[in-house]
Image (tube, grey):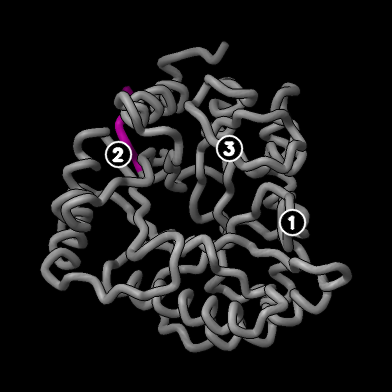
Amino acid sequence: MTALGSSVPPIGAHVQIKGGLAKGGLAYTDAVGARAVQVFVGNPRGWKPSAGDPAQDTAFTAGCAERGVPSFIHTPFLVNVGSPSEATVDQSVATIRHNLLRGAQLGVQGVVVHAGSAVGEDRYEAALGQLHERLLPLLEELPEGGPRLLVEPTAGGGRSLAATVEDLGPYLAALEHHPAVGVCFDTCHAWAAGHDFSVPGGMTATLDALVATVGAGRLGLVHANDSLDACGSTRDRHTTIGAGSIGAAPFAELLAHPEVAGVPVVVETPSEDDGHARDIALLCALRDGALLPA
């Protein structure tokens, strides 16, 4: 196996933290062989913020540093700054702020947020305006050296504000291409949104389009997930790497792309029966050329 260097994408998982961020999270990190981790720091399906446990926080930060493992936070799924509901927008901005502050405490590299949805008919421009009015001031408040906010395009359903990589153009323009904004690229979402990785060079073309749209260096994290559904389905259903409709070969293409050099990659695939450990091992083999993709 190739020695892990600065240009080699570290591969890990969204880790389980039962028992505590450090006690459970670091044990799971070691058990599955993760070299990058993503966590929730509160209820992923609720609004209530969690202050965390100072002892667990300190141990988690130290443990990630000792292991040389980059870490990330994923915001709750309810967040949607493009919503027509003022209450939802208020809660979303507050939640993003809280997660960015928690990220700074924990020393994470990035905080992932779903791009969100305009929800109603003919609200796209209004929703982008809300990003400018509500999210941009928050970004301006951030101290230097903190985590980047990583926008994750969604699978394309429900009047998404960004599904294809090209959709990120107007999204980032609404945020004035703020330097604290990066991108989280999810393979299942991109496939569901219509990016066809089944053709030779399909993944490379998608990543080339990403760079052309947002510029080099904006990619901060990759979610490596296979899909249970067909390309263009707009359905977000993850499955084991190589067991879904994407297949293993496009992931080798992904890991060889220049824009992914050094960028952490995490799986959000089924974890049962050592699923994360097997997916991490497969991706490492594809990355290192130890396994030729079928």
Q: Secondary structure at mark 3?
A: loop
Per the picture, the main secondary structure of the magenta-coloured stretch is loop
From the viewer's perspective, tell me whether residue 64 is left or right of residue 279.
left
Which is in the foreground here, disc 1 or disc 2? 1
Looking at the picture, how far across and down is residue 264, in whole percent? Answer: 43, 46
Looking at the picture, how far across and down is residue 49, in whole percent? Answer: 36, 75
Where residue 82 is drawn, which disc sits there? none
Looking at the picture, how far across and down is residue 63, in whole percent? Answer: 16, 54
Q: Earlier in the sequence, mark 3 or mark 2?
A: 2
Residue identified by numbered label 3? 237
Q: Secondary structure at mark 1?
A: loop
The image quarter containing residue 276 is top left
Mark 3 crowdedness (10 Å alpha carbons): few <14, some 14-19, many ≥20: some
Mark 1 crowdedness (10 Å alpha carbons): few <14, some 14-19, many ≥20: few
Which is in the foreground here, disc 3 or disc 2? 3
Asked if residue 273 shows in the view, the reply is yes
Residue identified by numbered label 2? 34
Q: Earlier in the sequence, mark 1 or mark 2?
A: 2
- Identity, as a three-letter code, of the amino acid under mark 2: Ala
Please give the name of the residue rendered at 22% of the width and 54% of the height, measured from the top-left corner.
Answer: 64
Can you name the residue that lies furthest to the right here? Answer: 122
Distance in Å between CA atoms under marks 1 and 2: 33 Å
Q: Quadrant of the C terminus?
A: top right
Residue identified by numbered label 1? 158
255 magenta-colored? no
Asked if residue 176 shows in the view, the reply is no
**100 shown above or below 205:** below
Query: In the rendered structure, are the residues bearing label 1 and label 2 in contact, judged by CB atoms less than 8 Å apart?
Result: no
Instruction: Please give the range of residues in magenta.
Output: 1-5
- Identity, as a three-letter code, of the amino acid under mark 1: Gly
Looking at the picture, how far across and down is residue 83, in whole percent? Answer: 68, 74
Query: In the rendered structure, are the residues bearing label 1 and label 3 in contact, judged by CB atoms less than 8 Å apart?
Result: no
